[in-house]
Image (cartoon, rainbow, N blue to C red):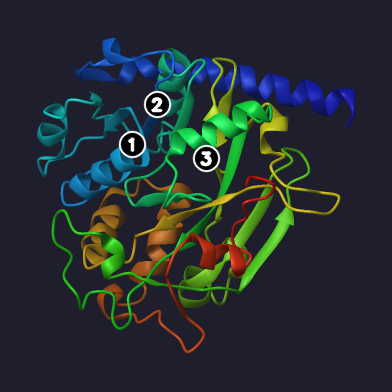
Amino acid sequence: MSIWENYRRRLRRQRLLVRAIRKRRELRVISDRTHLLTDESILLFAVLRNERIRIPYFLKYYRKLGVDQFFLVDNGSDDGSREYLADQPDVSLWTTPNSYHSSRYGTDWLNGLLRRHAHGHWALVVDLDEFFVFPFCDTRPIRALTDWLDTSGTRSFPAMMLDMYPKGPIGAQPYVEGQDPFEIANGFDSGNYMISRNYFYGNLWIQGGPRARAFFADDPENAPSLNKVPLVKWDRSYAYVNSTHMLLPRRLNLTYAAKGGEQASGCLMHAKFLSTFTAKVDEEMKRQEHFASSQEYRAYAARDPDKVDLWTKWSEKYINWRQLEILGLMSKGNWA
């Protein structure tokens, strides 16, 4: 690792932190419950827009998992999301009408809040359609995982995003508020993944799965990336670079065993493909606020999203985290 590369990464991180401080000024507080934090609180951070139908189950899931406080940014919702969240006793809420694109797709806002509120805490950063699964999550809370990571001197924990989908057309089964989305979207691809390594940042780069084969079959190199580092023992000097795909300092991305064996890892079960999908595609095509001029959403819109059937004869039906470990999609490593 050259001195010049180390300098470039350090300069990059400093610039990201300056952006975070500046962009945090775009946020207006709606409900501030940060006084409820303790030194041991486990925190969750997310940016959302018009996710009212998803919010009840999202909060229920992560409360059960053991999250103590939620730090959420509402980016101009007009479906009641902001009003609902403002009434939640464990949610601190900010709002902004500013551009999602100009905040580097919400990353600057999150870096600003993480720097201000998460120093010294374990912080989980997810989207409203992502559900964190880790080894033993059916019998152990997330604090058991963070305690083990603390004991082992580990400050970051990776999770591969696993796209979940229903059997039959995406829009065939209506999703209702409060419902477990995986009652509908319970299928996934057990293979069909490509992995490379980003040398500069050190992270793995994973692509593939149903989005790659169904929407990017002619352009797989531009398929969405699936590698994430969503759980970090935060320090105010840290910064996410590109969503939660990678962060700085570089060592936080080295979450895999490079010389044999396995390191513990999880999955982010991704509940994008529900009956709400078409409305979201239509909205994002109008807003044009997503990465690369909404390239991903243009690929979705090119087909009739409601009628797309992602299920194949090779699809697996989700059972539990142990199934994912057997299939090699996550690992308990040496955590017993």
| Residue located at (29% from left, 53% from top) | 284
Q: Position of residue 17 (x, y in %)?
A: 54, 18
Q: CA distance from mark 3 to mark 1?
A: 12 Å
Earlier sequence position, callout 2 versus callout 3: 2
Q: Could you tell me if residue 104 is visible in this image?
A: no
In which quadrant will I find the N terminus? Answer: top right
The label shown at residue 109 is 2
The answer to whether marks 3 and 1 mark residues whose Cβ atoms lie closer than 8 Å is: no
| Residue located at (53% from left, 32% from top) | 146
Q: CA distance from mark 2 to mark 3?
A: 13 Å
The answer to whether marks 1 and 2 mark residues whose Cβ atoms lie closer than 8 Å is: yes
Give 195 or 269, whichever is nearer the viewer: 269
Q: Which residue has dot 3 on it?
A: 244
Looking at this view, name the residue that lies furthest to the top: 35
Give neighbour class at mark 1: few <14, some 14-19, many 20+ (Cα, 10 Å).
Answer: many
Q: Which residue has dot 1 on it?
A: 47
| Element class at badge 1 | strand
Which amino acid type is marked by label 2? Trp
In this picture, is 111 found above or below 107?
above
Give neighbour class at mark 3: few <14, some 14-19, many 20+ (Cα, 10 Å).
Answer: many
Which amino acid type is marked by label 3? Thr
Is 286 positioned to the left or the right of 10 in the image? left
Q: Position of residue 229 (x, y in %)?
A: 57, 41
Which amino acid type is marked by label 1? Val
| Residue located at (60% from left, 49% from top) | 265
| Element class at badge 2 | helix
Earlier sequence position, callout 1 versus callout 2: 1
Is 59 positioned to the left or the right of 291 in the image? left
Give neighbour class at mark 2: few <14, some 14-19, many 20+ (Cα, 10 Å).
Answer: many
